[in-house]
Structures are given as C-alpha cells and as structure tokens.
C-alpha cells in the first residue's frame, strides 16, 4: 500500500479503535493503555500535527496552503506590514469573520475622515449643485456661440447672390476698362502715324516720343472733362438746393 492509501486509512482505523475502546468493557490494563492512545497531551497534539503535515502531499508552505483553502495565511505576524491597519482591512475584506480581525478597523478614524474632508475641499471646492449649474451655463454659452455662428452663415448665404452679381459687375467693368484702354491706345497710335504721314516703326524713338506726348495731352483733356463734369454736378446740386429753399 502506497503512502496516499496509508494516509487515507490511518485516521479511520485510529478512530474505529478509539470507539471500540470507549464502548467495550475491557480489562483495566487495556483501559490504561487506551488512555494513552486518546491522551490529549502536547505530545499527542504534536504527533497529530506531524501527521497533518505529512498529509499535505502538495508540499506547499503553510501560508500558501491556507490561501488555497480560503483561510488566513498567517496566524501570527511575519512582517512589519502585517501589523498595519491596511493589511488587517485587506484580510477582513477577503476572509471576513474567519480572519479574526476586528471589523471596527475597517472604518476610518476621525483623523482619516478629517484629512479626507480637507482633501476633498481642495480638490472639489464646489458642491454638486454648483458644478451642475456651471456645466449648464457652459453648455448654454457654447450653444449661444453655435447659434450666432449659424445665423451669420445663414445671413451670408442669403448675400451670396448679391456678392456674385457684384463680382460679375467688377469683372465686366475691368474687361470694359481694358478694352477701352486698348481702343484708346490704338487710336493714339493711328494719330501718331497720321502725324508723320508715313509708316514708322512703333519702336522708333521719334514714334515713342510723339506717342508719349499724345498720351499726356489725352490725359489732360480727360482731366479737364472730369473737372467740368464735377462742376456741372455741383452747380446742379446748388440749383436744386436753391429751388427747395424757395419753396
């Protein structure tokens, strides 16, 4: 029979023998011997502990064996950390009343509560109602910005047609001015050619001088024409104003 079978049958045989010894009328000598078998002395306890130790075929340490069987790892502190409140709270949280820890240790002390309150007063200086109001005000301000932006975009979209027409008008005016400048330039070139009475290369110095002179005269005439138009406009306004005063 191997070691596992011997360990399995040993307590059963011992218990059967003890029950037989306590329920049967045996001679005095046998009873004295049986008293030795069931003696609860330190030596018997040590022997039982040794038997229990040999039954642990897993060869795990006592602490690991207790952990696997959902028991407190150590009955006595083995390290300075095992004397801390944090460790005892952890034991009670995992093993409950089987840990042997006083449940009152799980509650914070007055000092812990005071430190926690001071920390929260600095970290979270506002109440829940104040934070909710601040969040609502922030959302309202953000929504106002969004609404304002949407109104501006809507207004600009309505002006797209007008802006498009203005752009087309500017382009048309620019093309018209370019065409007018081209026509004026061609007209001045023809006048210079007629002035000389013969064909002359436009790159010739005499041609360029005469063309510059004609352009200068043309600008002077245009300036005078604008001045006269402005004077006529001012006279018309004065006449209209006098007519209104006479009424």
Image: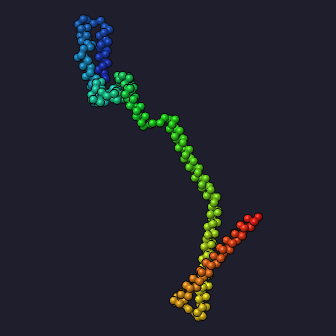
Determine whether 182 is above or below 65 in the image: below
Could you tell whether 128 is left or right of 55 in the image? Answer: right
Q: Residue at x 59, y 50 (%)?
A: 147
Q: Position of residue 172 (x, y in %)?
A: 63, 72
Side of 154 relative to 107 (left or right): right
Task: Tell me where residue 231 appears, x and y as whole percent.
Answer: 66, 74
Quadrant of the snapshot with the N terminus:
top left
Q: Is residue 125 visible?
A: yes
Using the image, determine if residue 189 lies above or below residue 85.
Answer: below
Residue 30 visible in the current orientation: no
Nearest the eye: 25 or 162: 162
**Residue 2 placement: quadrant:** top left
Which quarter of the rendering shows the C terminus? bottom right
Left or right? Give the position of 144 relative to 118.
right
Name the residue rendered at 27%, 29% in the picture. 79
* Front residue (pair 152, 67): 152
Seen from the viewer's position, the closer of residues 236 and 83 is 236
């Amino acid at each position: 029979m191997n070691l596992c079978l011997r360990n399995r049958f040993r307590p059963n045989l011992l218990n059967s023998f003890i029950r037989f010894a306590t329920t049967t009328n045996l001679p005095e000598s046998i009873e004295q011997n049986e008293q030795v078998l069931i003696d609860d002395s330190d030596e018997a306890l040590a022997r039982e502990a040794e038997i229990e130790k040999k039954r642990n075929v897993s060869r795990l340490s006592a602490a690991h064996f207790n952990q696997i069987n959902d028991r407190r790892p150590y009955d006595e502190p083995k390290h300075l950390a095992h004397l801390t409140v944090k460790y005892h709270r952890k034991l009670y949280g995992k093993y409950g009343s089987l840990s042997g820890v006083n449940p009152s240790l799980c509650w914070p002390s007055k000092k812990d509560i005071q430190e926690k309150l001071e920390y929260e007063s600095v970290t979270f200086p506002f109440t829940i109602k104040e934070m909710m109001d601040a969040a609502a005000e922030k959302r309202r301000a953000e929504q106002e910005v969004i609404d304002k932006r949407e109104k501006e975009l809507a207004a600009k979209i309505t002006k797209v047609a007008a802006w498009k027409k203005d752009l087309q008008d500017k382009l048309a005016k620019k093309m018209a001015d370019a065409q007018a400048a081209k026509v004026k330039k061609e007209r001045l070139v023809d006048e210079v050619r007629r002035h000389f009475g013969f064909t002359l290369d436009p790159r010739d110095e005499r041609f360029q001088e005469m063309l510059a002179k004609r352009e200068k005269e043309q600008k002077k005439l245009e300036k005078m024409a604008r001045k006269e138009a402005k004077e006529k406009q001012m006279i018309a306004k004065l006449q209209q104003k006098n007519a209104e005063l006479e009424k």
